[in-house]
Image (cartoon, rainbow, N blue to C red):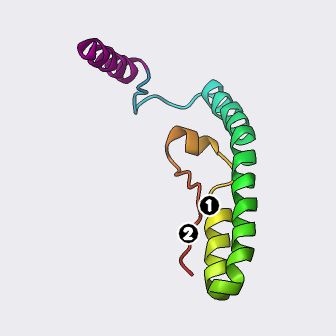
């Protein structure tokens, strides 16, 4: 059973590298730009509600942290929860831009 699972995983890995790899020399066409744009909109529609929920929970947590940790700690909690990437851009889908779910708490 383990050999079968390992074999399937290896085959899946090889197939994904073979069929999903995009050559670096391939020029972005208008059809690719449209597909990345549509993918960006669709992915943002799925991502934004999750990010919003996380930000709301972080805001509540930040408010609860305020009396015990002070304004600096509460600010770091809010910045971490509500910071980061809010929109998935076509460049993020291409791998040229990083998607950061949580913000940077350095203040």
Q: Nearer the viewer, residue 20 or 54?
A: 54
Label 1 SS: loop
Q: Position of residue 98 (x, y in %)?
A: 52, 52
Q: Position of residue 49 (x, y in %)?
A: 75, 46
3 is within the stretch colored magenta: yes
Q: Are marks 2 and 1 in contact (CB under 8 Å)?
A: yes
Up-down: is 96 above or below 17? below
Residue 53 horizontal side relative to residue 96, left or right: right
Label 2 SS: loop
Give the mark count.
Answer: 2
Up-down: is 47 above or below 78? above
> Residue sitting at 68 percent across and 43 percent down?
47
Residue 68 quadrant: bottom right
Q: Quadrant of the N terminus?
A: top left
> Residue sitting at 50 percent across and 30 percent down?
27
Magenta extent: 1-19
5 is within the stretch colored magenta: yes
Assign the magenta stretch its main secondary structure. Answer: helix
Q: Which residue is mark 2?
A: 104
Q: Residues within 10 Å of mark 2 (few under 14, many from 20)?
A: some
Q: Nearer the viewer, residue 75 or 98?
A: 75
> Residue sitting at 63 percent across and 56 percent down?
85
Q: Quadrant of the C terminus?
A: bottom right
Q: Which residue is mark 1?
A: 84
Up-down: is 59 above or below 73? above
Q: Position of residue 34 (x, y in %)?
A: 68, 29
């Amino acid at each position: 059973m383990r050999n079968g699972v390992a074999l399937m995983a290896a085959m899946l890995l090889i197939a994904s590298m073979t069929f999903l790899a995009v050559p670096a020399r391939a020029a972005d066409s208008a059809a690719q730009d449209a597909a990345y744009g549509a993918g960006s909109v669709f992915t943002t529609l799925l991502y934004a509600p999750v990010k919003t929920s996380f930000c709301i929970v972080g805001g509540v947590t930040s408010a609860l942290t305020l009396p015990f940790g002070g304004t600096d700690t509460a600010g770091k909690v809010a910045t971490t929860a509500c910071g980061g990437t809010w929109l998935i851009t076509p460049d993020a889908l291409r791998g040229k831009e990083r998607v950061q779910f949580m913000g940077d708490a350095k203040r």
